[in-house]
Image: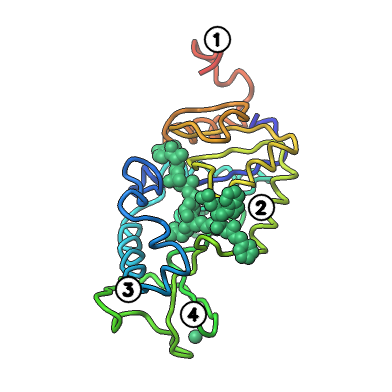
């Protein structure tokens, strides 16, 4: 399906970064197990208790800082660099797809085609709640009290992570690009998302409803599973390199007894 598709939209979620050491949201060890989302990932929570919310993000920034892209991020980056028509869309805020794109492109290469459309922003970008300016920031933040909260260098107002919280609109340009690519896609590869958060999940539902072949890689069943043409219940870092790495090989090149027995 991947080899035969002219245009592919890939939608990823927290599961693709799990094997890099980034906690997922809703799994066994998911972030939401210890923290209720409505306590932390909403504008109301931030207004009510910015210290608590910032402590959570400071901790996550620290965890993610020590994580590297895994074989799934890298395989997708290489796929997007070696052929046209690939649109990588992510709900993740960890920046690991972009890091994989730079790694795959090498020092002299252009990572552009492998850079993801980030639907939910980035934890390494800050936004001013006053003047709205945004900037990259990877510093280690130590938040003990209100006096430690980061302030805007321009206007002095409180800074927040430039991510999308519940009840907030997704960035318009990114969302419309992702939905457009979904509508045009011949195949949609969905990796490591519970597919319950909208409108991000709409990318996969849109692709499917417009006739794309749907391939799901996930350890568990999701609302997409029943619609998927292929479901791979396996860890992303093991299976994604196999399916996208095999793309481009002559049919038969996969050869061997597994292929003769009906495929690996
Ligand atoms: C593996 C694996 C391995 C693990 N290999 N797999 C329609 C219906 C119902 C509700 C709504 C609707 N439309 C909108 C809503 C409301 C709401 C919503 O979706 N609620 C539902 C949850 C009920 N949506 C919103 O509020 C959105 N905004 C909005 O609609 O605005 C409207 C508006 C318009 C105009 C003006 C104003 C407003 C915003 C949603 C923002 C979501 N934000 C978060 C936090 C981001 C910041 C941060 O990170 O702190 O985004 S929530 C969280 O969920 C995060 C994620 O990106 C997102 C999705 O999670 P994901 O990636 O799927 O992770 P998990 O953990 O859930 O799943 C991991 C999966 O991987 C599992 O399935 C595992 O099995 C699997 N897995 N290891 C393969 N190794
Ligand atoms: Zn400002």
Disc sitting over residue 51 in the figure = 3
Q: What secondary structure is marked by label 2?
A: helix
Q: Looking at this view, is 70 or 220 the one in front?
A: 220
Q: How many marks?
A: 4
Q: Earlier in the sequence, mark 2 or mark 1?
A: 2
Q: Is residue 210 above or below residue 17?
A: above
Bin the neighbour count of mark 3 within 10 Å (Cα to Cα): few under 14, some 14-19, many 20 and up.
Answer: some
Q: CA distance from mark 2 to mark 4?
A: 26 Å
Instruction: For marks 2 and 1, give the one nearer the viewer.
Output: 2
Bin the neighbour count of mark 4 within 10 Å (Cα to Cα): few under 14, some 14-19, many 20 and up.
Answer: many
Q: In this figure, which residue is indicated by the disc labeled 4?
A: 128
Q: Earlier in the sequence, mark 3 or mark 4?
A: 3
Q: What secondary structure is marked by label 3?
A: helix
Disc sitting over residue 178 in the figure = 2
Please provide percent x and percent y for residue 55.
31, 68
> For residue 167, what is the image quadrant?
bottom right
Q: What secondary structure is marked by label 1?
A: helix
Instruction: For marks 2 and 4, give the one nearer the viewer.
Output: 4
Whether disc 4's CB lies below 8 Å from ligand 2 is answered yes
Q: In this figure, which residue is indicated by the disc labeled 1?
A: 260
Q: Is residue 217 above or below residue 48?
A: above
Instruction: For marks 3 and 4, give the one nearer the viewer.
Output: 3
Left or right: 91 in relation to 234? right
Q: What secondary structure is marked by label 4?
A: strand
Q: CA distance from mark 2 to mark 3?
A: 33 Å
Left or right: 141 in relation to 210? left
Q: Earlier in the sequence, mark 1 or mark 4?
A: 4
Q: CA distance from mark 1 to mark 3?
A: 59 Å
């Amino acid at each position: 399906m991947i080899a035969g598709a002219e245009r592919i939209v890939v939608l990823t979620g927290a599961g693709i970064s799990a094997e890099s050491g980034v906690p997922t949201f809703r799994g066994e060890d998911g972030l939401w197990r210890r923290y209720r989302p409505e306590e932390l990932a909403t504008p109301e929570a931030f207004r009510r208790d910015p210290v608590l919310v910032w402590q959570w993000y400071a901790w996550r920034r620290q965890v993610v800082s020590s994580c590297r892209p895994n074989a799934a991020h890298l395989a997708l980056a290489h796929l997007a660099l070696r052929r046209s028509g690939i649109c990588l869309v992510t709900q993740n805020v960890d920046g690991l797809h972009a890091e994989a794109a730079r790694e795959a492109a090498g020092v002299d290469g252009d990572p552009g085609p492998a850079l993801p459309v980030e639907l939910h922003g980035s934890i390494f970008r800050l936004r001013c709640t006053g003047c709205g300016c945004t900037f990259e920031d990877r510093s280690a933040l130590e938040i003990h009290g209100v006096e430690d909260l980061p302030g805007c260098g321009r206007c002095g107002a409180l800074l927040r992570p430039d991510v999308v919280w519940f009840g907030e609109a997704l960035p318009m340009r990114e969302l419309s690009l992702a939905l457009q690519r979904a509508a045009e896609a011949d195949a949609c590869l969905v990796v490591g998302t519970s597919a319950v958060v909208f409108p991000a999940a709409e990318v996969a539902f849109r692709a499917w409803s417009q006739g794309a072949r749907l391939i799901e890689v996930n350890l568990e069943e999701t609302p997409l599973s029943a619609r998927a043409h292929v479901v791979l219940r396996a860890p992303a870092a093991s299976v994604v390199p196999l399916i996208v790495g095999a793309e481009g090989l002559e049919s038969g090149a996969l050869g061997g007894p597994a292929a003769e027995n009906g495929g690996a």
